[in-house]
Image (cartoon, grey):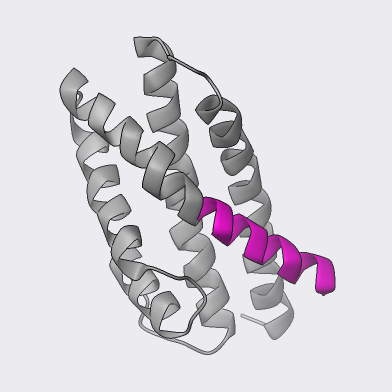
Amino acid sequence: MSEEIKDIRWKQRFQNFEKAFRLLDMAIQIELPSDTERAGVIQFFEMAFELAWRLLKDYLEEEGYVMIESPRDAIKQASQSKIIDDGHTWIDALKDRNLTVHAYHEEMAVAVENKIHNDYYPILQDLYNSFKRKIETE
């Protein structure tokens, strides 16, 4: 893979992440969401999180890191490289994303929605802002 394509890859991934993040951003603004709206918040979180770790992976690979094969690998290396803050919250988000993908329980959905609002949305927002600045300064 040429250096030019590698460079473009994380930027393309950012564009997809940006779309998913904006959907999450709109959904998270809903006060007292219905069950359907709550499911939407969770779904948009799942999409944004998936694209976020893949963005981190692509960016880290461009920076020369290898052997990043999983979300956990990407989060760990991004935290060590100071690309993200609070790697523990990212790992918690990964665990909750894995739970919500495989089953739906209303009590769990409410708890995860609260974590999305209070913990996970802020870290995704920080990532979005950080990479938006990278794009704008390129």
Q: Which residues are magenta?
A: 124-138
Helix, strand or loop: magenta stretch = helix
Asked if residue 125 is among those painted magenta in the image, a careful observer would answer yes
Q: Where is residue 127? Give x, y as percent.
A: 56, 60
Residue at the outermost right position: 137
Q: Return the residue nearer the eye: 131 or 5.
A: 131
Look at 41% across and 77% down and name the residue there: 79
Image x and y of residue 96, in percent: 25, 45
Q: Of residues 99 and 10, which is closer to you in this image?
A: 99
At a point 44% along the width and 16% down the height, the residue shown is: 37
Q: Position of residue 23 (x, y in %)?
A: 59, 32
- For the question of whether residue 68 can be seen, the reply is yes
The N terminus lies in quadrant:
bottom right
With respect to residue 78, does 90 lie above or below? Answer: above
Q: Is residue 35 above or below residue 61?
A: above
* Foreground of the two, 8 or 96: 96
Q: Is residue 129 inside the magenta stretch?
A: yes
Which quarter shows the C terminus? bottom right
**How far across and down, in percent of the image, does residue 135 sit?**
76, 66
Q: Is residue 46 visible?
A: no
